[in-house]
Image (cartoon, rainbow, N blue to C red):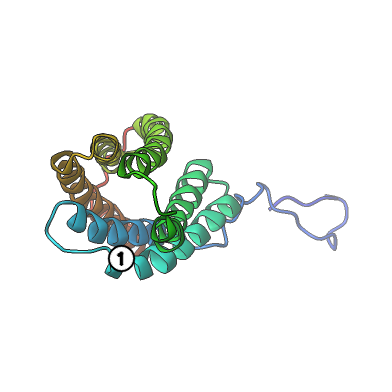
Amino acid sequence: MANPDPTNPLSTPLPATRPAPGSFLADPAPLGLAGFAMTTFFLSAVNAGLLNGVDGVLALALVYGGIVQLLAGMWEFARGNTFGAVAFSSYGAFWISYWYLVTHVLSSVPSGTSPSEINHAVGLYLLCWLIFTFYMFISTFKLNGALVVVFGTLVLAYLFLCIGAFGANTGMTKVGGWCGLVCAVSAWYTSFAAVTNSTFKRSVVPVFPLA
């Protein structure tokens, strides 16, 4: 602690260093990763052909993958973590937009709309997220190996899903689903590592730092 007036012993001490932004907040990253992992796992199982229908994922997409992950992003802003804030806020918005796309847009397509138009619209939607994910992937090389795997496999998932949508190719969609399953498991691992290491106050589960 530094005394603002060394000649006055009654003056209020000031911190010698300024506390980090949001240092009073718990780390929101494990929560955001968990919400992302669970929702991605469910939808990827559908895309990979392991489950039928997407109805079950919609509740997860809106609440856990969407709203909860969006909140994690806002808390990352408060902590001064730009990467986490942009990633969680954006993917939270992705899941909310996915919920809206399925429940309000694709369910009310005007009659006479050709299947190719729908496929191209979904493909363009996925292409936008592929571009965003790719440049976020580049930043992970300054963070840790666990996130490199999460974002690398997510890039592949979006790529194959995008190809599958544009070409109405179910085979490519299934490949994208399997990439998504790997992504989800790696995101769960990264969340588990963050929770465990925080609880034990030491590195118990490695995330393989690169910086």
The picture places residue 190, in percent across and down from the top left corner, at 28, 52
The residue positioned 15% from the left and 51% from the top of the image is: 48
User: Where on the picture, by quarter, is residue 31?
Assistant: bottom left
Q: Is residue 28 visible?
A: no
Viewer-nearest residue: 5 or 189:
189
Could you classify mark 1 by the number of other residues whose Cα lies within 10 Å: few (under 14), some (14-19), or many (20 or more)? many
**Residue in the foreground of this view, choosing between 199 and 52:** 52
**Could you tell me the amino acid type at mark 1?**
Val
Dividing the picture into quarters, in which one does residue 29 lie? Answer: bottom left
Q: Relative to residue 92, is residue 2 drawn left or right?
A: right
| x, y percent for residue 46 | 20, 58
Q: Which of the 4 image quarters holds residue 169? A: top left
Q: Position of residue 85 (x, y in %)?
A: 52, 48
In this view, the residue in front, 106 or 43, is 106
Secondary structure found at label 1: helix
Instruction: For residue 105, say whether it is visible.
Output: yes
- Quarter of the figure that contains the C terminus: top left
On the image, numbered disc 1 is attached to which residue?
57
Q: Is residue 30 above or below residue 5?
A: below
What number of labels is visible? Answer: 1
Please name the residue shown 87% across and 51% down the image.
7
Quick check: 20 left or right of 105?
A: right
* Residue ID at (28%, 44%): 150
Question: 82 or 105, which is in the foreground?
Answer: 105
